[in-house]
Image (spheres, rainbow, N blue to C red):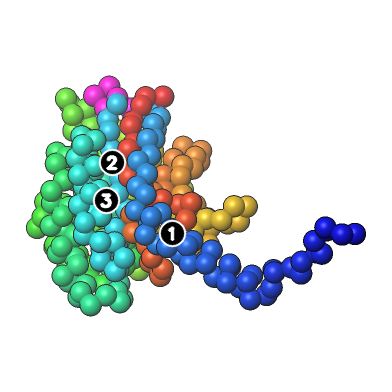
Amino acid sequence: MPGLTPPQPSRFTRRNFLIGTGVTAAGLALYSGEFARHELDIVQRPIVINNLPSSFHGYRIVQLSDIHLDEYTEPFFLERIVHKVNALNPDIVLLTGDFITHGSLTFIAGGHALHRCAEILSTLTAPLRYGILGNHDVAFNGPMVTKALTDNGIPVLINQHLPIERNGDRLWLCGVDDPGYSRPNLDLAIPAKPDGPVLLMAHEPDFADQVLAHPRGPLVDFMLSGHSHGGQIRLPFLRPLILPPMGEKYPEGLYRFNHMQLYVNRGIGTVGLPFRLNCPPEITVITLNPA
C-alpha cells in the first residue's frame, strides 16, 4: 500500500548482545569494586543477656573485623571507619581478627601494612580496645601482629580471659587463638566459675559448634566472630558466592542457640577479589540489654 514503510530487519545481533553484556559486566565490576566496597553499613544490634548486671545495662560495644590492610583496604578507608567509630562513642571496641592479608599481592610489604593498620587503630578513642588474631594474621606472623597491636594500645587475647568491671559489677571478656590456623584452648579462654556474663571472641564463626559442645560452652552468653565477609558477593536467590572454610555455616548476622548467641560481622575488607555486592562493609554497634 502506498505510504507504508516496509518492516526493517532487526538490529539485535550476537555482536550487539556481547557488547551490551560486556558494558553491563564492566559497570557491575566498577560498582562492586569502587562504590559498594566503600558503602559502609553501621548496624545497630541490641543483644539481650541473661543476668546482665545493672551497671552494664545499655553497655555499647563496637565490633570491627577483617580489615585486611592493605591489599584492597586503603588506609584512607580505615581512617574514615575509625572516625565514624569515635563519633559513636562506644564503651569498648572489639576487633575480631584479620588485620592484614597473608600473601598480599601489593607492592607494600605485609609488615608495613601491619604497622600502618596498628597506627590507625591506635587513634580509636574508646576507653577499652581489645583484639584477637585471625587466620591471615597467624599465617603471616602471629607474634608480630600481636606486638604491633599491643604496642599501639590494643591488647590481644590469645586463649585468655579478663574481667571488665563497672561500678562493682563484672562481665568476662574472652578470646581464643585462631581456630583455623592455631590451637584454640577454651579451658584457658573461658573462666571456670565466672561471676558475670561471658563474651567470647573467636575469628571463625563455625567454631561456635565446638564452643557449644565444650564443657564450658554453657558458660558463654555471647560470641563475636568475623572471617566470612558475609560472602562478599550476594546475588538474589543464591547463597553467598565467596565463603571460606569455617565461615560457611554461619556467614553473617545473629544466630541463637539454647543459651549462647553468635554475631558474625561482615568485615571491612575483601580477599581474593576487591568486590562487594549486596554485602557492604560493616561497623556493628552492639547494645547489651537485660533479659
Distance between mark 1 and mark 2 Cα atoms: 25 Å
Instruction: Please tell me which of labels 2 and 3 falls first in the chain.
Output: 2
State the image coordinates of residue 100 (x, y, percent, origin top left): 26, 65
Q: Is residue 232 above or below residue 258?
A: below
Looking at the picture, tell me which residue is in the foreground, 32 or 84: 32
**What are the residue bounds of the magenta stretch?**
51-57
Q: Residues within 10 Å of mark 1 (few under 14, many from 20)?
A: many
Residue 198 appears in the figure: no
Label number found at residue 95 = 3
Q: Tell me the amino acid under the disc marked 1.
A: Ser
Residue occupying image coordinates x 21% and y 37%: 87
Q: Which residue ends up furthest to the front in the rendered image? A: 2
The x and y percentages for residue 90 are 23, 35
Q: Would residue 271 appear left or right of 206 to someone viewing this image? A: left
The residue to which callout 2 is attached is: 62
Residue that label 1 marks: 32
First of labels 3, 1 by sequence position: 1
Camera-near label (3 vs 1) is 1
